[in-house]
Amino acid sequence: MSKIPWHIDSFFFYLEHLELCTCSPEWWNLLTRILKHSPRLRVLKFKSVSKHFVNYNEPMDCLNEPSSIPECVEIFEWRQYKGTKLEEEVAKYILANAVNLKMVTFSSKSIEKHQMFKKLEFVSMCSKECQLVFE
């Protein structure tokens, strides 16, 4: 995924809707590069597809945070949220830094989803008008 050559500056400037599979160990690094060059991004969706699944929950020295989340992001959705350490850090970062979020949805099939969602429920969100939904 990250080894494919492409000129990021020109393509992602027009991106308004992004759906990203989180099954690759490099998904967060790709996302940070995309966010940096996507000032028009309104909808951001994550999903982990089981058939692609690889174990990416290995310890990380640090989460390389993007310089910012595009201000126009209004909808954030995470399907098949597993609550791994990396996923939790990413979710908390986005909730705390996306200033114009209006709707956030997390869904999970895990039997421990209530504990996972509790950790996200009390994140101090940057957007005061955001509706937080757990499924």
Image (cartoon, rainbow, N blue to C red):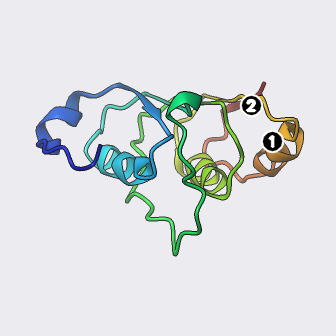
User: Label 1 sits on what residue type?
Assistant: Phe
Question: Which label belongs to residue 129?
Answer: none
Q: Quadrant of residue 106?
A: top right
Q: What is the total number of numbered labels drawn onto the structure image?
A: 2
Q: Position of residue 80 (x, y in %)?
A: 66, 31
Q: Nearer the viewer, residue 5 or 33?
A: 5
Given residues 89 and 121, the one toward you in this image is: 89
Q: Nearer the viewer, residue 78 or 54?
A: 54
Quickly name the residue at label 1: 117
* SS for dot 1: helix
Image: 89 above or below 30: below
- Mark 2 or 1 closer to N-term? 2
Residue 88 drawn at (x, y percent): 67, 52
Cα distance between the residues tagged 2 and 1? 9 Å
Dots 2, 1 in contact, CB < 8 A: yes
Residue 10 screen position, x and y as percent: 12, 37
Q: Is residue 76 visible?
A: no
Indicate which label's residue lies in the foreground, 2 or 1: 2
Which residue is located at x 80 percent, y 46 percent? 116
Quarter of the image with the N terminus in it: top left
Disc 2 crowd rating (10 Å Cα; few below 14, some 14-19, many 20+) is some
Image coordinates of residue 91 in percent, x first then y, are 62, 47
Residue ID for mark 2: 108
Identified by mark 2, the residue type is Ser
**Residue 53 shows up from this direction:** yes
- In the picture shown, does residue 55 fall above or below 13? below
Q: Quick check: 30 left or right of 73?
A: left
Which image quarter is the C terminus in? top right
